[in-house]
Image (spheres, rainbow, N blue to C red):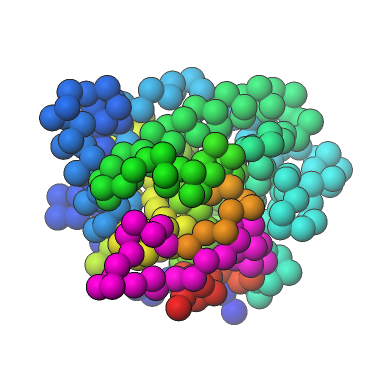
Amino acid sequence: MAPTVNCEIVPGGAEEEIPTIDFNLLVNGSADQRSEMIQKLGTACEDWGFFMIVNHGVSESLREAMIMAFKDLFDLTADEKQAYVGGHVLDPIRVGTSFNAKADNDKYWRHYAKIFVHPDFHSPSKPLNFRDVSEEYTTSIRSLVLKLLKAIWESLGLEEARISNFLDLNSCFQILVGNLYPPCPNPENKFGMPPHSDHGLLTVLYQNGIDGLQVMHKEKWITVKPVPNSFLVNTGDHMEIVTNGKYKSLLHRALLTDTMTRMSIVTVVGPSLDKFVGPFSDLLSTESPAVFHGFKYRDYMEYQQSNTLAGKSALDLVRM
């Protein structure tokens, strides 16, 4: 039976204002402006696990070109997409429906394409412009995320070089995901995506102007209404693991409508796939012992992607 959406929903608004980070001030501002943005970013990670980014420097033309490239990919014939259907969760290019068709009892109402883009770049051969657009887009997003991570480490009082080496961020894993949620005749009884957290450090989302993302905050579902030209960013499971629970991963889900098609572009950045990751030692003490044990990131991602999504249950794999 399909899951029923039956929890309290609070629209994003004045009482639940989603944190907004001015990326230009964070990167190029004065010392006081940077300090203010870093403090605001740390508070957003600790209190929400979620924030919006404005003035990020990624052009609207590139963002819309990426949306259109995914639309053209989804519009390919079944024969043209067949080479990328199914396969293993660690295959570098996959298209399909649901989350994991082998594990899900009920298929979620979406089409997806998942493409590994770093440290090794992959692209489907069609549509013809997909490679060039996706390479430019993902390079821009990776640069943005690494600068955000630098500021997040600063908010925790950590030395950037040490933690970047700990996670091998020069070889960080990056995956590009396109989601298409068609109109659903019974949206109250289906999810686009069920409540879940992401496996990486940070996730960056851009959508086609149709709302549907909800985030869990203070035990209530908040409907996200992005400001124009913004990116939405959430913390993932490996941010929670690395910070020993100080910055927790965000529980979120995608709802549906019965009239409009929603599209989103999701970019997840995590440690190197071959890194054995646990809490960073500088955040541990006698008073704050480790609450997670170390685990290879590749194995964690494979476990999460191979099983039915159930909230943040994948983290139970590494809890002490």
Spot occupied by residue 232 in the image (x, y as percentages of width and height)? 38, 43
Name the residue located 36 percent from the left edge and 28 percent from the top edge: 56
* In the displayed structure image, the side of residue 156 where residue 290 appears, left or right: right
Q: Is residue 249 visible?
A: no
In magenta, the rendered stretch is: 279-306
The question of residue 240 being in magenta is answered with no
Quarter occupied by the C terminus? bottom left
Q: Is residue 292 shown above or below 42?
A: below
Name the residue located 80 percent from the left edge and 43 percent from the top edge: 81
* In the displayed structure image, the side of residue 297 where residue 18 appears, left or right: left
Total marks shown come to: 0
Spot occupied by residue 137 in the image (x, y as percentages of width and height)? 54, 28
Front-lying residue, 156 or 189: 156
Front-lying residue, 314 or 266: 314
Quarter-wise, where is residue 118 in the image? top right
Q: Is residue 236 shown above or below 146?
A: below
